[in-house]
Image (spheres, grey):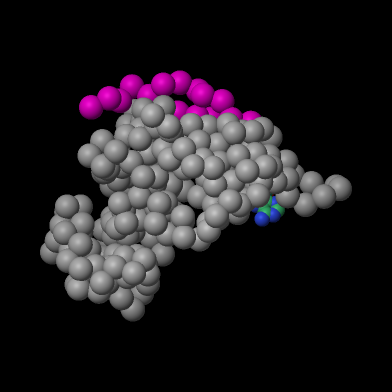
Amino acid sequence: MPSAISAHSLEKTYGSGEGEVRALRGVSLEVASGEVVALVGPSGSGKSTLLTSLGLLALPDTGTIRIGGELVVDAGVARGDLAAIRRSRLGFVFQRSNLVPFLTAVENVALALTINDVDARDAKDRAHALLASLGLGDRSSAYPEELSGGQAQRVAIARALAMDPPVLLADEPTAALDGPRSRDVMMLFRRIAHERGAAVVVVTHDHRVLDAFDGVHEMDDGILSERRSGAAHA
Ligand SMILES: Nc1ncnc2c1ncn2[C@@H]1O[C@H](COP(=O)(O)OP(=O)(O)OP(=O)(O)O)[C@@H](O)[C@H]1O
Ligand SMILES: [Mg+2]
């Protein structure tokens, strides 16, 4: 079976001359369906650059990226409609929940479906069901400012999951949360991987939660290495 997402020999350089930064120096990574991996490493080592490349938000200078076996970036060049691939096959969660402030929780989640041409009524039903499955059934009509940090982050996760993407990418999703809430969110990622068969890649600085992962990859100055295998298997 092909990996849910794989990258091969990614290179990315920002700037030139004196200010040149080689953010990715030949990075390869494969993540299987149902697997949750952590990306750790010092500030500035290239973790976000790798995640935005995997997420097709900013392309590498060279290297290949496959999603579900399909070649979507070849030698740094897009193959096909990347925006459509992003909307339908990739889910993103960031450090801040970035919810639309004037939409309720359920409307925020439904929006991810309607922009993919799901009928509005259907979208709302699915958004309600998803929020309920994440323990937010009673908060679905709340506006973002009425939610706690952990609740808002769960709404953002629900939004990322709305299209049931095979790949979920998260950049420091628990940075704004306390220890227990942070662990809750990591356990939620594990559940998503195991129940939905999604491949999940999480950038984290939080060493308290590393045991929740199937594998830990360490980025150091643009080079990725497997640090150790996580202990966790359900
Ligand atoms: N748009 C950009 N233009 C120029 N340089 C950039 C840009 N984005 C990132 N960099 C540089 O590339 C390197 C890698 O940055 P990146 O954001 O990927 O690191 P990171 O591992 O995510 O760090 P952090 O843990 O602080 O979030 C850094 O030296 C950074 O300054
Ligand atoms: Mg970063």
Q: Residue furthest right?
A: 17
Which residue is pictured at 58% across the width and 51% down the height? Answer: 79
| Position of residue 12 measured from the top left corner of the image (x, y, whole percent) | 69, 44
Which residue is pictured at 36% across the width and 74% down the height? Answer: 101
Q: Nearer the viewer, residue 35 or 209?
A: 35
- Picture quadrant of residue 126: bottom left
| Position of residue 80 measured from the top left corner of the image (x, y, whole percent) | 55, 55
Q: Nearer the viewer, residue 35 or 217?
A: 35
Which residue is pictured at 33% across the width and 78% down the height? Answer: 102
Tell me if residue 231 is in the magenta stretch: yes
**In this view, 120 is above or below 71:** below
Is 170 placed left or right of 179 in the picture? right
**In this view, 183 is above or below 165:** above
Tell me if residue 3 is in the magenta stretch: no
Which residue is pictured at 46% across the width and 38% down the height? Answer: 69
Residues in magenta? 216-234
User: Could one spot residue 134 in this view of the protein?
Assistant: yes
| Position of residue 135 measured from the top left corner of the image (x, y, whole percent) | 16, 54
- Picture quadrant of residue 117: bottom left
Q: Nearer the viewer, residue 67 or 94?
A: 67
Q: Nearer the viewer, residue 199 or 20?
A: 199
Quadrant the C terminus occupies: top left
